[in-house]
Amino acid sequence: MFDFIKKLIGISSGNIEYDLDTLQGIERIPIPNYKPLQGMGNPSNNIEYILQKKATEHKKNGRMDLAIACLRKANEIFPHSNFSWAEKDYMRLVEYLKADRQFDEARKEEAKIKELFTKFNQEQQAHNDKIHREIYGNTDIVSTNETSFVCEECAKYTKRYFSISGNSKRYPKLPEYLLHKSSAHKYCAIELYPVLDNIPEPAWNYKGDFIKYCNRPFIDERTKEQKAFFEKEVKEKEDSLKDKEFYDLIFEKFPDIAPKSFGGFRRMKAANSDNYKKLLQKANELLGYDFYEKK
């Protein structure tokens, strides 16, 4: 394994041997100088991927110090990778620190990761704005897509052509908020596409005169089923976030009553088991308030 890793990341270490089973070995792994991935790309040979797998192994073997060290090193390498790693990949370190009851350190790492991704998202938005200006510089007209996974407000703007400037006499002005991803619409799947030739050839079906169709009243046209599906999916995502907040709180404050894992807690809740009801009652007593009722 060690020879493979040294070959993989190009270590020339003399008499120093790098490994994934000691803290020193993990800490000494340098930042790789990766070549670009070809095609879709697969990071399975990347050292940061191997570190994540090794972290799981160390955790199963009860070596949380080594598991956490692996994830720290992986997080250090992620920004230099030839693969795009998501926030959830970075957040594994936070979850492992919580599992090891290093709550203050977990909060510190989470703040660093949130700051990193806030900066990344700002840079990405600036990049997207630049691309928009370059693409839309050749046209004033954009099209929205056909989607049912949108909120009541975004639903008003699907399946239309818009004028970015508002100077078109044929199409309505594009709402400003559609140009920028807002946290209020983080679950909405509405997209914009440039229309370079201004010819009405949309990828979606419409009825009657095309110009009139694009200027139809701005109302929510989703079916009852589409509305219910969107609400159900959003509620499930929000409930999961709330459950995680509750589980993290009791795991830190009251470890004697907390289930061993968040997954176990969610299964208890989904089943509405007697143990879940007892847990909720006890947690509320210890907290002095009903967590799920608190605004």
Image (cartoon, rainbow, N blue to C red):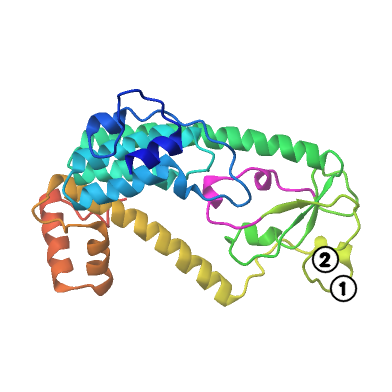
x and y percentages locating residue 57 in the rendered image: 26, 51
Q: Quadrant of residue 51?
A: top left
Above or below residue 114? Residue 185 is: below
Q: Secondary structure at mark 1?
A: loop
Q: Alpha-carbon distance for marks 2 and 1?
A: 7 Å
Residue corresponding to mark 2 = 213
The magenta span reads 173-190
Q: Quadrant of residue 94?
A: top left
* In the image, residue 177 lies in the stretch drawn in magenta: yes
* In the image, residue 79 lies in the stretch drawn in magenta: no
Amino acid found under the numbered disc labelled 2: Tyr
- Residue at image position (35%, 34%) is 73
Q: Is residue 152 left or right of residue 281?
A: right
Above or below residue 114? Residue 145 is: below
How busy is the neighbourhood of tag 2: few (under 14 within 10 Å), some, or many (20 plus)?
A: some
Residue corresponding to mark 1 = 208
Q: Nearer the viewer, residue 108 or 54?
A: 54
- Residue at image position (36%, 54%) is 241
Amino acid found under the numbered disc labelled 1: Gly
Q: Secondary structure at mark 2?
A: helix
How busy is the neighbourhood of tag 1: few (under 14 within 10 Å), some, or many (20 plus)?
A: few
Q: Nearer the viewer, residue 149 or 29?
A: 29
Above or below residue 248? Residue 107 is: above
Work out whether mark 2 precedes mark 1 in sequence or the reverse, and give the earlier one.
Answer: 1
Q: Quadrant of residue 291?
A: bottom left
x and y percentages locating residue 81 in the rendered image: 50, 37
